[in-house]
Image (tube, rainbow, N blue to C red):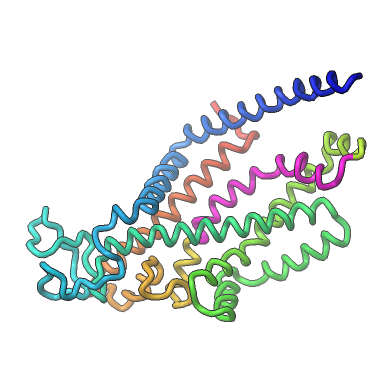
Amino acid sequence: MTSGATSEVLVLSQKPARAATQNLLLETLRNLLRNRSAVAGLMIISFLFFIAIFADRAATHNPVQSMIGQPGETGRLPGKAPCIALFGCTDAQHAMGLDLNARDLYSRIVYGTRTSLTVGFSSIAVAVFCGTIIGLFSGYAGGWTDNVIMRILDVVLAFPSLLLAITIVTIRGPGLENALLAIAIVSIPVYARLIRASVLSVKEMEYVTAVRAIGAHPLRILFLHIFPNTWTPIIVQGTLGIGTAVLDAAALSFLGLGAQPPTPEWGQMLSEARNYVFTAPHLVFYPGFAIMLTVLGFNLLGDGLRDALDPRLNRI
């Protein structure tokens, strides 16, 4: 067979594969949109993304600027209750009130959305990347290499994730960057074990054996033939993991190990107002509700993705 004929055969063989991939993506999207919980989660996350991207326009005040001495501000300012002109408030309007430093709470909530989503996505992106690489090589290599890597990950998994994250941040020092790194480190074993389990099942399939038999390089087999068939559980776990990362970042900030004042971050805002739950409940309600809404959105979307990507489910 000539080289031209061989190239033509390869092109013709690639077209059905591309069509099958496109059909799979369309089918997954249709299944996702049929799931009401997933649609609700997608709407929540889209709203949060919109707020985070356009925080500069959505916010009404500088999130770190105190309102003390500003024009139109009268009466007691620190911890001031929500003031909405539509409801008859005659002072300067603050839809969610002011915090204990007389800063606009609504603006801090808006900018806190950007901070929390950045930490959530960045930490999980690092964890997924490192965990995928570790899981791929561990599962494909097998033998003593796999045993050594898995035992190390078992040691990490033996510690409660939040406690281990607190330890890492305590050693490196408080700060949002160190909190992000700590959350990523404690999340790596989850993704590594998940991708390893997929590799162990996929590498024994007939098409992988055939590619190996014709002498393909192990890296080519690993990244071009095995990895594309193992990413489904990573997508689902990663989506769920973002919500957990946001929650962990808020917990670290609540303990004073994450975002430092005056950075607008929901956990840090809760920490500042924890002693004023009964005297100024709005200081606790709004950041707490923001955390709950974010975690709920990612959990709903993650559950919907799991159902949409699972071919074993019977759908009407």
Provide residue 168's location: percent of width, then percent of height.
59, 76
Q: Main secondary structure of the magenta part?
A: helix
Closer to the camera, 169 or 161?
Answer: 169
Provide residue 178's location: percent of width, then percent of height.
54, 72
Closer to the camera, 256 or 295?
Answer: 256
Provide residue 202's location: percent of width, then percent of height.
78, 42
Q: Report if residue 264 lies within the magenta region.
A: no
Closer to the camera, 34 or 29?
Answer: 29
Q: Quadrant of the N terminus?
A: top right
Closer to the camera, 309 or 117?
Answer: 117
Q: Tell me which residue sits at (53%, 33%) in the image.
A: 29
Q: Tell me which residue sits at (60%, 38%) in the image.
A: 309
Numbered disc total: 0
Image-quadrant location for residue 227: top right
Q: Report if residue 217 lies within the magenta region.
A: yes
Q: Is residue 247 above or below residue 293?
A: below
Q: Quadrant of the C terminus?
A: top right
Image-quadrant location for residue 3: top right
Q: Is residue 237 above or below residue 281?
A: above
Q: Tell me which residue sits at (55%, 76%) in the image.
A: 169
Q: Tell me which residue sits at (38%, 70%) in the image.
A: 263
Magenta range:
216-245
Image-quadrant location for residue 103: bottom left
Q: Is residue 203 above or below residue 164?
A: above
